[in-house]
Amino acid sequence: MVLDKLSDSLKNTLQKIAKSVFVDDKLINELVKDMQRALLQADVNVQLVLELTKTIKDRIKQEKELKALTQKEQLINIVYEELVNFLGKEGHKIELTKKPFKIMLVGLFGSGKTTTSGKLAKFFIKRGHKVALVGLDIHRPAAMDQIEQVAKAIKVPVFIDKKEKNALTIWKKFKSELIKYDVLIIDTAGRDALSDDLIKEIEDITKEIQPDEKLLVISADIGQTAQIQAEQFHKSCNITGVVATKMDGTAKAGGALSACAVTGAPIKFIGVGERVDDLETFNPPGFVSRLLGMGDLEALLEKAKGAITEEEAEDLGKKFLKGDFSLIDLYEQMQAMKKMGPLNKLVDMVPGFSQLKLPKEALQVQEGKLEKWKYIMQSMTKQELEEPDTVINSGRIDRISAGSGISTREVRELIKQYRQSKKMVKMMKGSGDVNKMMQKFQGKMPKGFGG
Ligand code: GDP
Ligand code: MG
């Protein structure tokens, strides 16, 4: 996942707390030191780190008397809450209040504007909206070709003019055609730095287009220096939010996120890879719980939207947590998860999974394999599907194999994968720390999140 070093350090710190016999000054000091070290390594500004850890320390001292929670739980809860505050408190969703809803992307060269245009277009298409891309980068020679390719890859209409050298002329040319779309993603030109020239260009475009969202795209690999950029753009161009890109490739993302948060420009999305699906809405509570290894069911559900219905997604999460599923459930889960993208990314989002070492095969879903599973299952009796563990023996495997035309080896493989998945869920449920944490944070999780 993103920020995995920071995540590991914070998880270790929390585990130390969980294992300690009692909460005393020594433990608190150790906690504070550990957190400071971890945050500084993630390039968070020293001043911010000191303020955060002071707040945590003060709260721990002041709130010591609360009886509802054990002191350890209290401690973990304070760390969680303050990290959430630190990253901007709550998520800021984009509500499409108009048609067409105009989202304009601004930012420096190479920050990821064009890539993010495609990601955002896909994001809204998945949610059932009619989307078009508008390319207004008239500075970079190959910019129009790039956005054309991006659009083609996701099959979305793109409005560009390769010869025109004035962004507003391009906009005016297509304006009447664009009103039939729900969402317009408008890519603009960047510069090496925020210059008067760029400010003027953004102002001019803004005046004409009147975008409903003006998102600053910032590359997270610049760490805490993101603050200057976010501040400058916030002041000069009135941005309405930030997209932090390249979160996947940097250990400095903590610096970038916290730096943007202090400027008051809310981070609305994060880019977590080069592919068009590598975009996540940014939601501090979910982000922090993932960082601390508590999983993020909300992000999982978010991701599942568009791929499967909300109900199906919730069911999927519940079944995982319940642990008593049949072969058919396994099949359905694998099928649903296949639609959602690479499993190793998803696993980070399932509560507790990230803390466990999972067998690799348990995470692989291959197209051909699922097809074969279907044939195998069609040759099974109802009882075999429901209780494969108790009733399927080698005699039955031979029969199932003959009936389905799939080799006995593959029938065994399916049973094996089923057992592994079952074990994996059991492990997750049986893991004391995970259970405790999940109970602890249940109040903060979306509905349907059970321990
Ligand atoms: P622009 O100049 O602002 O339009 O930037 P581009 O969209 O052309 O992106 C610049 C480079 O950053 C490209 O090579 C992208 O593939 C890469 N990039 C953009 N977003 C991400 C991200 O979230 N993760 C990673 N790893 N690379 C990204
Ligand atoms: Mg570009």
Image (cartoon, grey):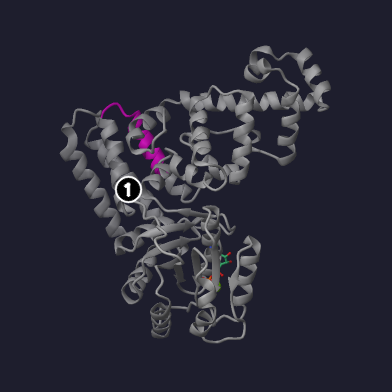
**What residue sits 55% from the left and 87% below the top?**
165
Q: Residues within 10 Å of mark 1 (few under 14, many from 20)?
A: many
Q: Main secondary structure of the magenta part?
A: helix
Give x and y (percent) for residue 238: 33, 72
| Quadrant assignment, res 327 | top right
Q: Which quadrant contains ligand 1?
A: bottom right
Q: Is residue 322 left or right of residue 403?
A: left
Give x and y (percent) for residue 334: 62, 35
Q: Is residue 22 above or below residue 129?
A: above
Q: Residue 15: within the magenta?
A: yes
Which residue does the numbered mark 1 point to in the structure image?
A: 83
Q: Residue 79: within the magenta?
A: no
Q: Which residues are magenta?
A: 9-22
Q: Is residue 179 above or below residue 153?
A: below
Q: Is residue 215 left or right of residue 162?
A: left
**What residue sits 70% from the left and 15% below the top?**
392
User: For numbered disc 1, what is the local secondary structure?
Assistant: helix
Give x and y (percent) for residue 101: 44, 65
Quarter of the picture holding the C terminus: top left
Give x and y (percent) for residue 222: 44, 65
**Is residue 420 visible in the rendered structure shown here?**
yes
Q: The disc labelled 1 sits on which kind of residue? A: Leu
Camera-side residue: 154 or 18? Answer: 154
**What residue sits 65% from the left and 65% below the top?**
152
**Is residue 111 visible in the rendered structure shown here?**
no
Camera-side residue: 348 or 166? Answer: 166
